[in-house]
């Protein structure tokens, strides 16, 4: 699968006590247009798994090409994230953390969680979205971060 380029996303949520959670995800995709559904896959050993299994809402933050530092922060095995040092807003529809300067974001209502081997599959309906029209996404390919060449073929 290392030969398949993927966009880099950070999925975020907040629990009932307003604790914030986030995780870097490469396995994110659109599932349906009507209704607008997306899904991501999360390792069952991830410390944040219970937060995403129990949340009502989550946000998908599509990282920009200069945000590989954010990807590394949220890919870390550390339980605590440095939320106080990060620039983010709370989603208008869901309250989920929206990281600033991302290429795009989606605010979602969780609709289902399914088993998927050593991962869980989390499905959400898109409630709101935003994008940076001139933004360029961060790509992961061949074991490293890449920039997207926008040359048409």
Image (cartoon, rainbow, N blue to C red):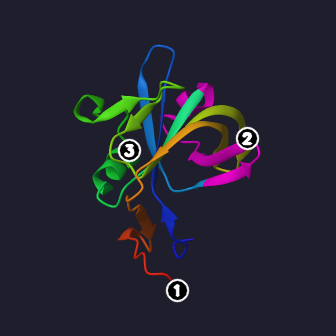
Please, is residue 61 above or below residue 4 in the view?
Answer: above
Disc on res. 153: 1
Q: Residues within 10 Å of mark 3 (few under 14, many from 20)?
A: many
Dot 3 lies on which element? helix
Q: Nearer the viewer, residue 72 or 63?
A: 63
User: What number is the disc on residue 114?
Assistant: 2
3 or 2: tag closer to the N-terminus:
3
Give SS at disc 2. strand
Q: Position of residue 52 (x, y in %)?
A: 57, 32
Residue 74 badge:
3
Work out whether mark 1 precedes mark 2 in sequence or the reverse, and give the earlier one.
Answer: 2
Is residue 48 inside the magenta stretch? yes
Task: Say which quarter of the image contains residue 148.
Answer: bottom left
Measuring 29% from the left and 58% from the top, which residue is drawn there? 66
State the CA–CA distance, disc 1 to disc 3.
Answer: 34 Å
Give the magenta-colored segment's residue range: 29-56
């Amino acid at each position: 699968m290392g030969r398949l380029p993927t966009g880099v996303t950070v999925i975020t949520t907040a629990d009932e006590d307003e604790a914030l959670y986030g995780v870097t995800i490469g396995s994110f995709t659109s599932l349906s247009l009507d209704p607008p559904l997306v899904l991501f896959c999360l390792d069952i050993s991830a410390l944040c798994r219970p937060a995403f299994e129990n949340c009502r809402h989550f946000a998908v933050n599509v990282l920009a090409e200069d945000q590989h530092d954010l990807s590394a922060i949220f890919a870390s095995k550390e339980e605590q994230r440095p939320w106080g040092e990060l620039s983010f807003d709370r989603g208008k529809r869901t309250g989920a953390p929206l990281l600033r300067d991302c290429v795009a974001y989606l605010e979602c209502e969780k609709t289902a969680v399914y088993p998927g081997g050593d991962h869980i599959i989390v499905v959400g309906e898109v409630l709101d979205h935003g994008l940076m029209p001139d933004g360029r996404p961060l790509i992961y390919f061949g074991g490293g971060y890449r920039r997207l060449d926008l040359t048409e073929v």
